[in-house]
Image (spheres, rainbow, N blue to C red):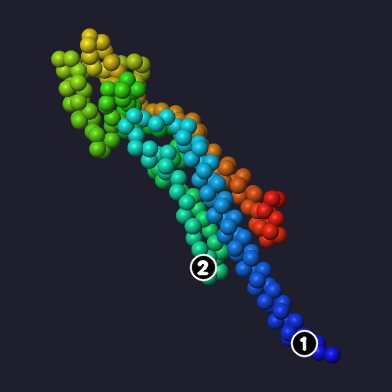
Amino acid sequence: MVELRLADQRRAAREFFRAEVRNLDAATKATTRTTARALRRETAKELRRFRRGKQSTGAFQKAVKVYDVDPRGQLGPASFVRLGVPFMHVFQEGSVIRGKPRLAILLPTGEALGFRRITPGNTWKQASEKMQARSDDRQVRIIPISKGRTMVAILRQGQWVPIYLFQQQVKEPKKLSFFEMAEALADEMPRLIEALMRNDYAS
C-alpha cells in the first residue's frame, strides 16, 4: 500500500500553515483598513457639529485623512487616521487658549459684515483699515467690557456694531472623543479578524 511519508506530511503541514498565515494577513489587512475608515467616518460626524463660518472653505470638516501601509518585512499591515488641523488637540482634550498678549475673536456681527479672523494673512492693521473704511465717518470705538476684555465696534447707520472681542484667554471645552472612539473600535478588531478567518461575516 502506498502511504504518505513523514516528509510528505510535513510538506503538507507547511503548505497548510502558509495558507493560514496568508489568510490571517488578508483578514488583518481588511480589518485594519475597515476600522480606520470607520474611525474617519465617526470623527467626521463629530466635526460636522462645529459651526462653519461664512468664509470657511470647509477644510476643517474635511481634515480627517486615512493612510494605509502595506506589510513590509516583519511588519504587518497598518492604517492610521490623521486629523490634519494643528490645533485639533484643543478640541480632543480641552484647553485654555492664551493670547500674546490678547486673543482677537471675530464676533458674529463682524462676520456678517464680511470681516475675517485676525491671521498672518489678515493682520490687525489690515482689519483696522477695513473697519475705518466700513464705518460712518471712519468712527471706530474701543469699548472696555470687563477686566481683560475689550470690544472693538464701528458706527454704522447711527448704531455701534461690535466687530472684534479682545481678551487674554479662552477656556475651550472638550468637543471631540477621537481617542475614545479609536479605543472602542480597536477592541472590536480581534473579533472581526476571527470572523473573517471563519468566513463568518455576520458575527
* Res 168 quadrant in image: top left
Residue that appears at 24% across and 38% down: 121
In this view, the residue farthest toward the right is 1
* Mark 1 to mark 2 CA distance (whole Å): 36 Å
* Res 32 quadrant in image: bottom right
Disc 1 target residue: 5
- Foreground residue, 22 or 84? 22
Residue 136 picture location, percent across and down: 18, 15
Disc 2 target residue: 72
Position of residue 66 relative to residue 168, above or below, is below
In the drawing, does residue 111 fall left or right of residue 26? left
Q: Does any portion of residue 165 appear in the rendered image?
A: no
Instruction: Please say if the residues under marks 1 and 2 sit with CB atoms less than 8 Å apart.
Output: no
Residue 164 picture location, percent across and down: 30, 23
In this view, the residue farthest toward the front is 1
Q: Secondary structure at mark 1?
A: loop
* Res 16 quadrant in image: bottom right
Which amino acid, mark 1?
Answer: Arg
In the drawing, does residue 17 fall left or right of residue 66? right
Residue 145 picture location, percent across and down: 34, 15
Q: Does any portion of residue 96 appear in the rendered image?
A: yes
Query: How many discs appear?
Result: 2
In the drawing, does residue 92 fall left or right of residue 180? left
Position of residue 52 relative to residue 183, above or below, is above
Quarter of the rendering occupied by the N terminus: bottom right
Residue that appears at 53% across and 65% down: 71
In the drawing, does residue 103 fall left or right of residue 10? left
Mark 1 vs 2, N-terminal side:
1
Residue that appears at 70% across and 82% down: 11
Position of residue 59 relative to residue 105, above or below, is below
Neighbourhood count class around disc 2 (C-alpha, 10 Å): few under 14, some 14–19, many 20 upward: few
